Amino acid sequence: MIPNIPAITNPERYSEFDLPREKIEYALGEAIKKIDFALPQFTTKFPSHSSINNVYTQEENTSGWNTGFWTGILWHAYELTGDEKYKTVALGQIPSYLYRIENKLGVNHHDMGFVFSLSCVAAYKLAGSEEGKKAAILAADNLISRYKENGKFIQAWGNVNDPKDNRLIIDCLLNIPLLYWTTQVTGDKKYDEMAWNHFNTTVGVCCRADASTYHTFYFDPETGAPVKGVTHQGAFDESAWARGQAWGIYGPMLTRTYKESDEAMQVFKATSSYFLNHLPEDYVPFWDLCFTDGDNEPRDTSSAAIAVCGMLEAMKHMDKNEALYSIYKNAVNRIMNSLIDNYLTKDVPESNGLLLHATYAKPQGIGIDEMNIWGDYFYMEALHRLLNPDWKLYW
């Protein structure tokens, strides 16, 4: 369903708050120091999805969904500083993406946008890389091979047509921009049509009446009818997993950049208002929004950074006189101020990432109260958006 927009229950928490440009520039400077510290280790290799004791280990670009975030960080560093070394390293990584998709290494899943948009689409947009363009289009072909006409959605995980895996997850709202882009560069409308169908199916089943979201939703493999919403990484099936809610904030706005969709804006306003109503005192969520101050649960800074990017994108499409515009502006400033003041790695000299206190998957015991590379990526994107509101998206 397309949920109604919840009222902001404590609007005084989002009263006028200024985040000076000087503080954002300071934060960028600290981020660049850490990127430079990490660069020798991750020139041809990639950071692990989560840190161990706040240090990323090295990985090859052969599996997982996380490698594109590091290349995306390098593209942001290049654009923000003008330093060619970041561009050189980022372009040097593109052959590994083409090799990976041509040889189908670790791509039996839906996360093609996370892997290829921030690396290869960005390489094409910023440096005219035909190799990047080729890899991204092949990744789009791989993504649509998971499209289920019976239900009109992209299967998230597992082998296609395996009945036990006949489901989507809300995260894929950030993978489908790869398909919109592929239609733009190839002229083939099938990518756009499947992406748009998947968007509508996802918001139709994952958004609850109160504007919280399901992480994953199952469909009947025979009829394609929606069956049930559950969680995979949240606290319980009916809770609002913080990162899933953040995907439900930013994802609709990425569709909105390609589609004149009132529904996308409505979903964004609903999911973001729910998110803001469930933030703790310091504006950085715990790993599930059912938790609050005093629950002694780990945070997920990555969810905060993702939500900020969604709100900053939405504000570009909103009337500045609209009441929610000022709410979102002040929320962005307060969340980012808290991340900069309380969650940076600058006082952890051995750390080779940007944001502390993220959580990958608490129920599975993965990356709890560590850094994660997508949190670092979205934090860099948020800084870039704040410093240059006209930034051209990699998505």
Image (cartoon, rainbow, N blue to C red):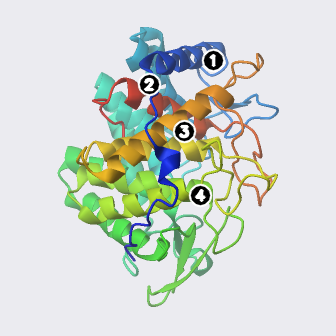
Instruction: Inspect the image, locate mark 4, and give the three-letter code of the amino acid beneath it.
Output: His
As measured in the structure, the alpha-carbon distance from the residue carrying label 2 to the one carrying label 4 is 30 Å
Q: Secondary structure at mark 4?
A: loop
Q: Residues within 10 Å of mark 4 (few under 14, many from 20)?
A: many
Q: Residues within 10 Å of mark 3 (few under 14, many from 20)?
A: many
- Any part of residue 165 in sight: yes
As measured in the structure, the alpha-carbon distance from the residue carrying label 4 to the one carrying label 3 is 13 Å
Instruction: Inspect the image, locate mark 3, and give the three-letter code of the amino acid beneath it.
Output: Ile
From the viewer's side, name the closer residue of 298 and 114: 298
Q: Residues within 10 Å of mark 1 (few under 14, many from 20)?
A: some
Instruction: Inspect the image, locate mark 2, and give the three-letter code of the amino acid beneath it.
Output: His
Q: Which badge, 3 or 1, comes first in the chain's sequence?
A: 1
Q: Quadrant of residue 1?
A: bottom left
Per the rendering, the mark at residue 335 is 3
Residue depicted at 57% across the width and 20% down the height: 31
Disc 1 designates what residue? Answer: 34
Disc 4 designates what residue? Answer: 278
Residue 346 relative to residue 384: left or right: right
Per the rendering, the mark at residue 333 is none
Q: Please say if 111 is above or below 385.
A: below
Q: Which badge, 2 or 1, comes first in the chain's sequence?
A: 1
Disc 2 designates what residue? Answer: 76
Q: Secondary structure at mark 2?
A: helix
- Any part of residue 378 in sight: no
The reply to whether callout 3 and callout 1 are in contact (CB within 8 Å) is no
